[in-house]
Amino acid sequence: MTSLFDFNLFVALFLFFFGKVSKAIGFIYIDPKHFISNDIYNYIKKKKLSNALTEFGFTNNYTDYSLFTYFKGGSCLYVLVYVDDFIVGGNDSKLTAEFKAYMSECFHMKDLGPLKFFLGIEVSRGKQGIYISQRKYTLDIISECGLLGAKPVDIPIEQNHTLAKEDGEFYPEPTKYRRLVGRLVYLSITRPDLCYPVHLLAQFLGQPRKRHWDAAVRLVRYLKGTCGQGLLLSNADDLHLDAYCDSDFQTCPKTRRSLSGYVVLLGKPPICWKTKKQERVSLSSAEAEYRAMAYTYQELIWLKELLLIFSSSSSRIHNSSL
């Protein structure tokens, strides 16, 4: 039987993948002539997979369709599916082994053992808890930009920048810029410190200018000095959700829309964060703050519903605070 602290680490890890990885946007390459979105490809693969899981006794969760749950007596199993990869977790090793044998009969699958690497995310265990990072992925970005020998910088973006007002010469290789920013978007799922600069750079994908490229290169130089940075899911934390949000009133010089930002903590470590322009122009700073709070509360409601799924296995649930 898994102890409470181990179970809390397991829940924190699953919620991290729910909050960040399952929302990642991308495309799967099928053949030289056709591309198919993750959602469609996932549906095709998951239709057969969901049938096999249902026959075993799993229930598909409607809060997030990527999650399948199995409860029998005091035993429980959770399966988190992403395209054709999935993570299995539970509190009964015998039941887990039985499930793996069943899946091997249904599909040609490979058991990779304890979770160490998933979708470019490295997972390591220690006495203090579970550490999540994307060190190899970060080094690949630095190497691709030819900056392995570059001098690191201390902050990811210049203070008091005017990138939104930039009207200088266009960058001659926009595809290169888009590829770099796309890789930085995926890197930000384990790096809260990249949330704002990546959000800013992603606004210029249509027609990036030379200065925007320079800002992206500066961000890569920042990664050079922090390539091993990640998240520690401590084994001393409980399942208490806390959220912090803020807004920047009319921060966009072109549209006058405000900026919302939030971070959600499970115990002490953050599991979900985002920076986003508000959909409408706020007439006051108070209105912008309330919009940010409403946006954050939507995320909290979804995460709280996910936590309730795990509460049947002796986890402790506290009221979310905002």
Image (cartoon, grey):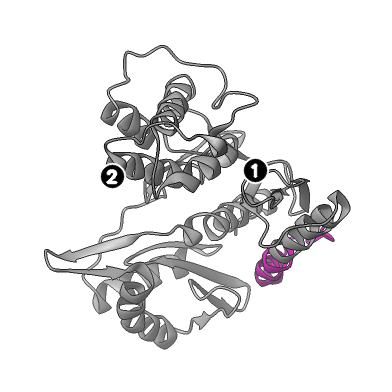
Amino acid at circle 1: Pro
**6 falls in the magenta region:** no
Say which quadrant the C terminus sits in. bottom right
> Along the horizontal axis of the image, is 317 left or right of 139?
right
Q: Which mark is residue 175?
A: 2
**309 falls in the magenta region:** yes
Return the residue nearer the eye: 94 or 181: 181
- 206 shown above or below 50: above
Nearer the observer, disc 2 or disc 1? 1
Q: Main secondary structure of the magenta part?
A: helix
Which element type, helix, strand or loop, lies under badge 2?
Answer: helix
Q: Position of residue 140 (x, y in %)?
A: 30, 33
Say which quadrant the N terminus sits in. bottom right
Whether residue 227 is visible to the viewer of this picture, yes or no, is no
Residue stretch rendered in magenta on the structure: 300-322
Q: Position of residue 247 (x, y in %)?
A: 76, 47
The span from disc 2 to disc 1 (Cα, nearest Å) is: 26 Å
> Residue drawn 45% across and 24% down?
218
> Residue drawn 60% across and 28% down?
161
Which element type, helix, strand or loop, lies under badge 1?
Answer: loop
Return the residue nearer the eye: 173 or 170: 170
Q: Position of residue 181 (x, y in %)?
A: 40, 42
Q: Position of residue 227 (x, y in %)?
A: 44, 26
Q: Residues within 10 Å of mark 2 (few under 14, many from 20)?
A: some
Whether residue 118 is visible to the viewer of this picture, yes or no, is yes
Return the residue nearer the eye: 145 or 61: 145
Q: Which mark is residue 253?
A: 1
